[in-house]
Image: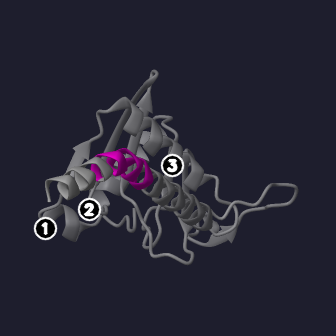
Amino acid sequence: MNALSDDGMIKALYRASAEGVKIDLLVRGICCLRPGIPGVSDNITVHSIVGRYLEHSRIYHFAAGGENKVFLASADMMPRNLNRRVELMFPVEDEKIKATIIELFETMMADNVKTRVMDSNGNYRKLDRRGKELLNVQEYFAQMAEQKAIASDRLRKNDRLCRLAAVKPILTNWTANKVKAG
């Protein structure tokens, strides 16, 4: 999400962490929650990715006992979004789409170039990248999108050529018949 500042949501996350729930947050901007406080938020990590693109999906993934629930939303967890605006949150029920979204989120959490991780004082620190393959997730997704666009364009061109090849004999026969009918 882009921002987490709603007191009720923060308290709910603290309660869940205190009960042992592991919580990974990817909050691009404002985050009023403090991770790593013993007994309160020691099961919470807060990552922030600020890069070339102003990108902040709103993915909410809950997993327990082998069950995955995924929601997409228009709202950040801010009082103005939750109390004074009409926002949308909906479940992703298609298993293939759900798996794709979970994979995308896991890829975002694996970023080690632009990610900063918040400590219990609210300070952000770069990840230790020594000995690790570098992943700038925004650039990675941009490259994926470009490759898909190129592949899609090739398919459209091939499809057009196939249709032309199929239509050409029909046009040739039609033109020949029209000339004969004169």
Residue sitting at x 61%, y 67%: 139
Q: Earlier in the sequence, mark 2 or mark 3?
A: 2
Measuring from the top left, give residue 36's x and y in whole percent. Answer: 59, 54
Measuring from the top left, give residue 168's x and y in whole percent. Answer: 36, 51
Residue sitting at x 39%, y 37%: 98
Residue sitting at x 35%, y 40%: 70
Q: Earlier in the sequence, mark 2 or mark 1?
A: 2
Secondary structure under the numbered disc 3 in the rendered image? helix
* Other residues around mark 1 within 10 Å, as few (<14) / some (14–19) / many (≥20): few
Examine the residues drawn in magenta and state their main secondary structure: helix
The answer to which image quadrant residue 117 occupies is bottom right
Say if residue 36 shows up in the picture.
Answer: no
Secondary structure under the numbered disc 1 in the rendered image? loop
Residue nearer the viewer, 146 or 151? 151
Secondary structure under the numbered disc 2 in the rendered image? loop
19 versus 182 height, above or below: above
**Amino acid type of the residue that numbered disc 3 sits on in the rendered structure:** Leu
**Amino acid type of the residue that numbered disc 2 sits on in the rendered structure:** Ala
162 versus 55 height, above or below: above
- List the residue tagged with mark 3: 104
Quadrant assignment for the C terminus: bottom left
On whether residue 170 falls in the magenta region, the answer is: yes
**Amino acid type of the residue that numbered disc 1 sits on in the rendered structure:** Arg
Q: CA distance from mark 3 to mark 1?
A: 28 Å
- List the residue tagged with mark 2: 75
Q: Which residues are magenta?
A: 160-171
Measuring from the top left, give residue 64's x and y in whole percent. Answer: 44, 27
Q: Earlier in the sequence, mark 3 or mark 1?
A: 1
Q: Is residue 123 left or right of residue 54?
A: right
The answer to which image quadrant residue 160 occupies is bottom left
